[in-house]
Image (cartoon, helix red, strand yellow):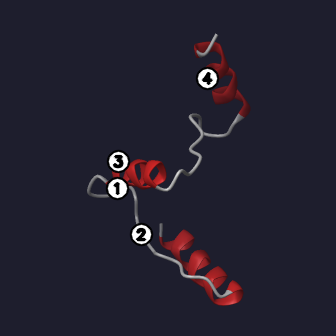
């Protein structure tokens, strides 16, 4: 989380946007991130991103 927060802060300075640092692994953060994503209509993929988990996900949706 620390590395991602530093990268986010640097990007915020570079592009003139606001970055909200956080650690979504602690204190129910994952659930809160899901709530925020839904509230703001953000896309959340339902697999980790690797080809193997995508194959597994696709098999579940058949």
The reply to whether the C-beta atoms of the residues labelled 2 and 1 are less than 8 Å apart is yes
Asked whether disc 1 touches disc 3, contact meaning CB atoms under 8 Å apart, the reply is yes
Label 2: element kind: loop
**Residue at disc 4, secondary structure:** helix
Residue drawn at (42%, 54%) of the image? 33
Q: Identify the residue under disc 3.
A: 31
Query: Is residue 4 depicted above or below 10 in this figure?
Result: above
Q: Where is residue 31 in the image (x, y as percent from the top left)?
A: 35, 47
Query: Which circle's residue, 4 or 2, is located before the other in the chain?
Result: 2
Residue contact at pointers 1 and 4, CB within 8 angstroms: no
Q: In which quarter of the image is residue 61?
A: top right
In the picture of the structure, the residue carrying the numbered disc 2 is 22
- Say which residue appears at 40% left-offset and 64% top-offset: 23
Above or below, comparing residue 55 to residue 6 in the picture: above
The residues bearing labels 3 and 2 have C-alpha atoms spaced at a distance of: 13 Å
Considering only order in the chain, which callout, 4 or 1, is on the residue closer to the N terminus?
1
Q: How far apart are marks 1 and 3 (CA)?
A: 5 Å
The residue tagged with tag 1: helix, strand or loop?
Answer: helix
Count the labels in the image: 4
The answer to which of marks 2 and 1 sits earlier in the sequence is 2
Q: Distance between the residues labelled 3 and 4?
A: 20 Å
Residue 2 x %, y %:
48, 72
Please identify, in this view, whether the residue under mark 3 or under mark 2 is nearer the observer: 3
Which class describes the residues within 10 Å of circle 1: few (<14), some (14-19), or many (20+)? few
Report which residue position mark 4 lands on.
57
Q: Which residue is painted at 65% across and 88% down in the image? A: 16
- Which residue occupies 56% across, 44% down? 44
Q: Residue furthest left?
A: 27
């Amino acid at each position: 989380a620390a590395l991602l927060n530093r990268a986010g802060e640097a990007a915020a300075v570079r592009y003139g946007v606001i970055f909200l640092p956080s650690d979504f692994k602690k204190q129910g953060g994952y659930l809160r991130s899901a709530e925020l994503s839904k509230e703001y209509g953000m896309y959340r993929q339902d697999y980790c991103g690797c080809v193997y988990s995508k194959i597994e996900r696709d098999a579940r949706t058949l």
